[in-house]
Image (cartoon, helix red, strand yellow):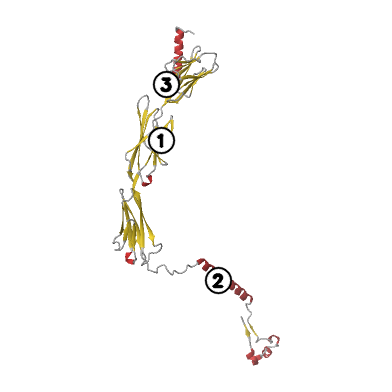
Amino acid sequence: MAITGSGSLAISFSVFVISVAFLQKGAAEIVTVDSQNLATDNVSVIEGETATISCRVKNNDDSVIQLLNPNRQTIYFRDVRPLKDSRFQLVNFTDNELWVSLSNVSLSDEGRYVCQLYTDPPQEAYADITVLVPPGSPVIESREDVVSEGNETELTCIAMGSKPAASIRWMKGEEELTGETTAEEMYDRMFTVTSRVRFSVTKEDDGVPVDCIIDHPAVKDLLAQRHLDVLYKPEVKIVVTYPEGLTREGDNLDLTCIAEGKPRPHQIKWLRVDEDVPLHTVVTGSELYIENLNKSYNGTYRCVASNAVGEAYDDYVLYVYDPRAGEGTPPKIDHAVIGGVVAVVMFAILCALIVLGRYFARHKGTYFTHEAKGADDAADADTAIINAEGGHNNTDEKKEYYI
């Protein structure tokens, strides 16, 4: 079909308007031409892999579909490939679709590809191919190979040659660290990213892994790892090897000093705080041995260990008891049993009081004598006295009952 003169100008103007409309709208995953029936997709592909470009037509009226490269050279006209680049291969072709693959994608393949439909006027849709370049293996550099506890260390992680620029995260064990990151553009929109992190270390950080983690759309699980090498002063502990219980006069004393540090302690010494060590004390490396204890040996014995980082110590307080100290200890009193016995006794006393109280209440007012017996039947007072049982002659037989 030949188009000349004003017709060609109209077509060019139409294509220009469509192109400007697309640029203003911006890149999208699905790219369509408004009020027309041609559609395509933007594609992101990792360098060296394969990209697939599709041109799709809805309600096609037998119009011809073709695919153009960013230089507007025809890649495919229907199912025919005029372009000699064999990396382009036909995936599928129908009246409504044209699918083309591009293998071994390089940075030079990046750009805007055109799906064109021969209608009147022609219709175009645009597919942007974005080539992703993963960074090289990251590298961690340290300001110093080893660091002493309490000091600050600095680590640097470098991710080179990525597109787009990579992002870097830091992890120390399970703790996330905050680094200072810079990105430098090199060529062809390639970037080198550098991140630095600083933190103070403790002896607990010795051997802890520090990870530099790279986040990039073209790669997963990319990281570099370095284990911290921390020096720390000794940790000292005195252990009593003998005796197991009290230290009595005449016993022997055996102490062992356990010291651990990084580097290993190069010196361990024993001393007696504020006094001299007894003359016959035997010190062999980390052990201290004293025979035949007496009370003059009482005091604080100290083990001091040192290495290149510093020194530390632990104390043992010696108190010598009498030879028979701790022997003949009175048996342990079971307070629970005593409490039970007391409770039973108090209960018995309470019951007895209740019984006696009831008894007294029942016999209240029963005091009487036999002197007036028979007087009730007398006619007068004289007769009553005379008739009183026993009279005055029976004084010895008088009995009184009272409670």
Looking at the rendering, which quadrant does residue 353 occupy?
bottom right
Mark 3, Cα crowd under 10 Å, few <14 / some 14-19 / many 20+, is some
Mark 2, Cα crowd under 10 Å, few <14 / some 14-19 / many 20+, is few
Looking at the rendering, which quadrant does residue 298 occupy?
bottom left
Q: Looking at the image, do the residues carrying marks 2 and 3 touch, with CB atoms under 8 Å apart?
A: no
Residue beneath disc 1: 223
Mark 1, Cα crowd under 10 Å, few <14 / some 14-19 / many 20+, is some
Q: Amino acid at mark 2?
A: Val
Residue 333 point in image, percent of width and height? 48, 68
Residue at disc 2, secondary structure: helix
Q: Looking at the image, do the residues carrying marks 2 and 1 touch, with CB atoms under 8 Å apart?
A: no
Residue beneath disc 2: 345
Q: Amino acid at mark 1?
A: Leu
Residue 311 point in image, percent of width and height? 31, 51
Left or right of 215? Residue 362 is: right
Give how far apart the Cα atoms at labels 2 and 3 are. 107 Å
Q: Is residue 26 visible?
A: no
Q: Is residue 209 visible?
A: yes
Looking at the rendering, which quadrant does residue 254 occupy?
bottom left
Counting the numbered discs, the total is 3
Residue 114 point in image, percent of width and height? 46, 17
On the rendered image, what quadrant is the C terminus found in?
Answer: bottom right
Task: Tell me which label, 3 or 1, sits earlier in the chain.
Answer: 3
Task: Tell me which label, 2 or 1, sits earlier in the chain.
Answer: 1
Residue at disc 3, secondary structure: helix
Mark 2 or mark 3, whichever is nearer to me: 3
Task: Tell me which label, 2 or 3, sits earlier in the chain.
Answer: 3
Q: Amino acid at mark 3?
A: Asp
Give how far apart the Cα atoms at labels 2 and 1 are. 82 Å
Residue beneath disc 3: 109
The residue depicted at 39 percent of the width and 34 percent of the height is 168
Compared to residue 79, the image places residue 398 above or below, namely below
